[in-house]
Image (cartoon, grey):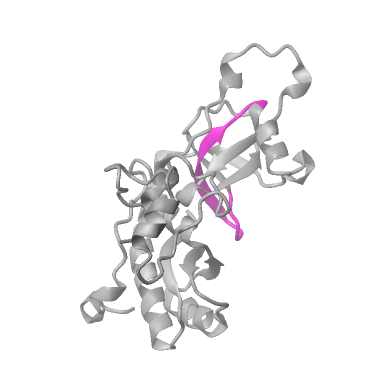
Amino acid sequence: MIKMDNINREFMPRGGAVLPASGYFGQSDAYDWVSVTNIPDDNQQTNIVEIQFKGHRKEFYINRKNLPLRNRELVVVSGAHRGYDIGQVSLTGPIVLLQLKKKKIAASDVVKMLYRIATAEDLQQCKTVKAAEKNALLVARVTASEIGLSMKFCDADFQADGQMVTFYYTAKSRVDFRELIKILNKRLQVYIKMHQIGLLEESRRLGSIGPCGKAWCCHTWSARLSEEEIRPIIYTAGGVNRLRKSTEGKFECYIRD
């Protein structure tokens, strides 16, 4: 294992919450207006639930046991790489069907299972696993630099059982990270997954304070906005004032002085 004392500070990760700190699973909830409305049509009921994970990632699972679930309740679900994971309930009931339709996912295609409501033991083990994310991110940055890969790691996300870690990175071009995965697999002793993201997704994960003095909207509540709806503005020489004028009415969070 790499010792922290030998690491150049430029590779140190920014911030990082540890489960079960507030906001770990994101803050962009979709309010379930249907839950407070009487719906006579029983055909609209479903046992599919939407679960939210770190970085506003949301997936759908089958609540086969029909467990009574509440919004923001922590549950144990099937993992992306065998094992299990822990997420937060973000939607239940008929409104989930609307979300599936919006994302063009057929209800029959949802096969992942929701196992149970998370216990204190589950959360303690998850907290221990998540505490290793900072170090894993640090190791990934150092390793990529050692083998000369031009990529910027912004986040690491461990599966709750510790069997897999997903690294999120940005890069200007396609990166051949096969050798990197081999080295990281030996150093971290877990299944490695790489996921390239854009600048907007990076902002969502890292967060910061915007010119309004508040946390970036894309990090707190407006994670649904896409790259096409908000494009980061790239400055050209001497074009600051022109760009400011041309972007009136748009989000200034992506303007860099």
Q: Tell me, yes or no, if residue 67 can be seen here.
A: yes
Could you tell whether 79 is left or right of 53 in the image?
right
- Residue sitting at 47 percent across and 33 percent down? 73
| Relative image position of residue 184 (x, y in whole percent) | 46, 78
| 48 vs 118, nearest the viewer | 48
Where the N terminus falls, by quadrant?
Answer: bottom left
Residue 249, above or below 165: above
Q: Is residue 131 above or below residue 61?
A: below
> Residue 47: x, y in percent?
68, 31
Residue displayed at 36% across by 44% down: 20
For residue 86, side relative to residue 208 (left or right): right
x and y percentages locating residue 60 in the rendered image: 64, 42
Q: Is residue 91 magenta?
A: yes
71 or 69: which is nearer to us? 71
Q: Is residue 74 above or below residue 53?
A: above
Residue 132 visible from this viewpoint? no
Label total for image: 0
- Say if the magenta span includes residue 135: no
User: Which quadrant is the C terminus positioned in?
Assistant: bottom left
190 relative position to 21: left or right: right
Magenta-drawn segment: 78-94
- The furthest residue to the left: 5
State the residue at coordinates (54%, 69%).
Answer: 194
Residue drawn 53% across the image and 85% down it: 179
Residue 220 screen position, x and y as percent: 41, 42
* Quarter holding residue 145: bottom left
Q: Nearer the viewer, residue 193 or 163?
A: 193
